[in-house]
Amino acid sequence: MTEDNIIRRRISILIDGDNAQAKLLPQMLAETSKYGQVTIRRIYGDWTTASMNSWKKVLNNHAVQPVQQFRYTIGKNATDSAMIIDAMDILHSEHVSGFCIVSSDSDYTRLATRIREAGVFVMGIGEKKTPKPFVNACDLFVFTENLTPKKKPARTQTAKSKTVKTPAAEPEPIPLLKQAFEISVREDGWASMAMLGNALYQIDPSFDPRSYGHGQLSRLIGKYKKYFELRTQDSNGTTLFHVKLKE
């Protein structure tokens, strides 16, 4: 995706209030804004229940419109059908060119697929427990765990009173990075960081450098100097990164 496309893109963010955290609303809006202008902001739920109280405290500050959906069956998520119907209405209105679905529920898999089939950008935001079919139906999927402030690694005490750090949660992404490089490499043996990033999202929509402790892809690549070579290029005051796989 180019910078011009991102600037022109208008996004509708639809939040499943039963499957999202109110405290992360500012971070979710900020993350969505990276990919376009968020013009429609709606959150769905049964506002007569106490479970939605935490949302009421943050909606006005962020201009998010609450949509009422009564629970017709006890224990059943009430928002699925309402969100899906609204999403299709918005899609056919052609008022937006992108969607963000906030939920960890696999029930939105078909919706994400339908939006993507229409040639419209669709991203998702949810927990790491989100089923893979929903994650892979999106062009991009962001885990809420990457939107929360990072805590210092927990330390445990051994019998000899030595302090031991807990192991890293994510495996090394080297095979994934190599696969993406093979997709994006040019004839000169180099790949632009932008094309490499696009290839990574094509392979795994949930890929995120923050899952590996780095805020930017270039910093993650720079960590693996044994496998990759980095080169910078100045373009009208902007630093562009290029990557090469070492022999």
Image: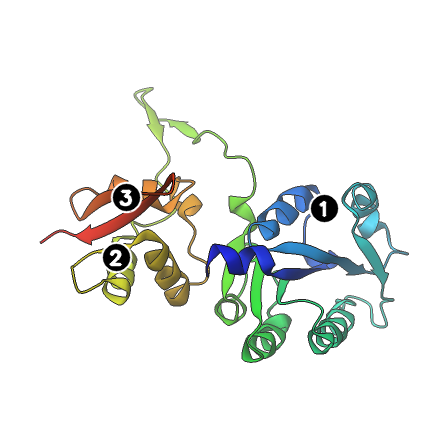
Q: Nearer the viewer, residue 84 or 163?
A: 84
Residue 120 image position (x, y, % from top left): 58, 72
Name the residue at 30% across, 46% down.
241
Q: Mark 1: which secondary structure?
A: helix
Q: Is residue 117 above or below residue 168?
A: below
Residue type for callout 2? Ala
What quarter of the picture does the C terminus occupy? bottom left
Residue 4 image position (x, y, % from top left): 51, 57
Q: Nearer the viewer, residue 159 or 165?
A: 165
Q: Which residue is mark 3?
A: 233
Residue type for callout 1? Ala
Residue type for callout 3? Gln
Residue 192 image position (x, y, % from top left): 30, 54
Q: Nearer the viewer, mark 2 or mark 1?
A: 2
Q: Is residue 62 above or below residue 150?
A: below
Q: Is residue 129 left or right of residue 218?
A: right
Can residue 129 be seen in this snapshot?
A: no
- The tag earlier along the polypeptide, 2 or 3, is 2
Q: Which residue is mark 2?
A: 191
Q: Nearer the viewer, residue 167 or 197?
A: 197
Q: Which residue is mark 1?
A: 22
Res 99 → quadrant: bottom right
**CA separation, marks 3 and 1?**
41 Å
